[in-house]
């Protein structure tokens, strides 16, 4: 990258994701101690941080747990012997910040949502400014938490048009619920939820095609899958054959990674794959909506 001397550094910085700096900035918007934020996350879910880490291991692996424990130990070595109430509070806050900064990203997003419910001031605008400034692909709502929106290009050209399309009453049933659920699963970010995100993305496109067929009075079987539904659309002259890859972009990944049994090996759906499939589904839904009569 060649720096532009007319632009500031922040606007030229590559996306950071939810790195340490981004997490610390976001936590600062909550106007709560780090200890209170961590407790909001643990409450009624985990007995203690050790109990939480025992739950992290089977989901995210022992390496993730080891990273958190190593960072906790490093932070503890930075704090001198506690001799006063103030130093005790400082040590507890550093411990909480360390856990929050190194927990799986989906858990961090959950912690922010849970803490925001008790924050003195709704942090929505501030968190979204931080995400935009650091080009983080998430949008925050106090009632819903974080929703994936993709990078700026994907957000503007795919996600936003799809969100507009599913407000149409004809897409307000299965298409909307499946697309919304895919975004929820992306936000959870666990291996199981990423697989489910791929599945829901493909289902949302299938549902949109069924709505389109019904609106054009083309008969179909409710059990027809994506490729059959597309064939019916082309035979009826509703969509041209050359749009197949646009409309069915989410179908093959769903069949390979989210829709059928994996056999001897479990499905592995990386986050970037789930994001790409959801973006593909968004493009298809926005296009199919334009084909409605």
Image: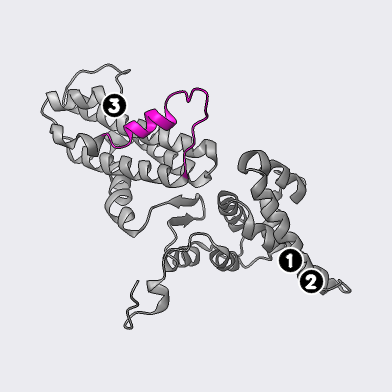
* Residue contact at pointers 3 and 1, CB within 8 angstroms: no
Q: Which label's residue is closer to the chain start, 3 or 1? A: 1
The outermost residue toward the bottom is 5
- Specify the segment rendered in magenta: 248-270
Relative depth, front residue between 143 and 158? 158
| Secondary structure found at label 1 | helix
Q: Are marks 1 and 2 in contact (CB under 8 Å)?
A: yes
Residue 239 seen in the figure: no
- Which label number is shown at residue 226? 3
- Answer with mark 3 or mark 2, whichever residue precedes in sequence: 2
Q: Give the residue pinned by disc 2.
A: 79
Q: Main secondary structure of the magenta part?
A: loop
Res. 265 visible in picture: yes
Q: Residue at x 41, y 40 (%)?
A: 180
The quadrant where residue 177 appears? top left
Q: What label does residue 75 carry, if any? A: 1
Residue placed farthest to the right in the image?
A: 83
Residue at 42 percent across and 27 percent down: it is 259
Q: Nearer the viewer, residue 117 or 77?
A: 77
* Circle 3: element type: helix
Q: Of helix, strand and loop, which one carries label 2?
A: loop
Asked if residue 287 is among those painted magenta in the image, a careful observer would answer no
Classify residue 156 by image quadrant: bottom left
Location of residue 57 in the rendering, given as x and y in whole percent from the top left corner: 67, 42
C-beta proximity under 8 Å, tags 3 and 2: no
Q: CA distance from mark 1 to mark 2?
A: 7 Å
Question: Residue 160, how many percent across, how many down?
Answer: 31, 51
Is 81 placed above or below 230 here? Answer: below
């Amino acid at each position: 990258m060649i720096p532009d001397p007319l632009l500031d550094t922040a606007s030229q910085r590559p996306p950071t994701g939810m790195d340490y700096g981004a997490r610390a900035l976001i936590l600062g918007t909550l106007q709560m101690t780090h200890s209170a934020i961590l407790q909001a996350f643990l409450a009624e879910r985990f007995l203690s941080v050790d109990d939480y880490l025992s739950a992290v291991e089977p989901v995210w692996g022992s390496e993730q747990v080891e990273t958190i424990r190593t960072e906790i130990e490093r932070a503890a070595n930075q704090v001198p012997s506690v001799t006063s109430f103030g130093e005790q509070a400082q040590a507890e806050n550093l411990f909480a910040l360390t856990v929050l900064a190194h927990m799986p990203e989906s858990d961090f997003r959950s912690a922010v949502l849970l803490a925001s419910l008790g924050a003195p001031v709704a942090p929505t605008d501030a968190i979204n400014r931080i995400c935009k400034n650091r080009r983080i692909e998430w949008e925050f709502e106090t009632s819903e938490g974080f929703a994936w929106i993709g990078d700026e290009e994907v957000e503007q050209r795919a996600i936003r048009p799809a969100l507009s399309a599913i407000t149409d009453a004809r897409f307000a049933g299965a298409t909307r619920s499946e697309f919304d659920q895919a975004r929820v699963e992306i936000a959870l970010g666990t291996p199981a939820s990423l697989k489910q995100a791929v599945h829901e993305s493909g289902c949302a496109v299938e549902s949109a095609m069924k709505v389109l067929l019904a609106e054009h009075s083309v008969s179909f079987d409710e059990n027809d899958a994506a490729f059959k539904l597309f064939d019916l659309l082309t035979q009826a002259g509703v969509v041209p054959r050359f749009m197949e890859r646009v409309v069915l972009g989410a179908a093959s990944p769903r069949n390979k990674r989210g829709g059928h049994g994996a056999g001897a090996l479990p499905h592995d759906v990386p986050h970037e794959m789930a994001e790409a499939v959801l973006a593909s589904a968004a493009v298809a839904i926005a296009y199919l909506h334009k084909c409605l009569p």
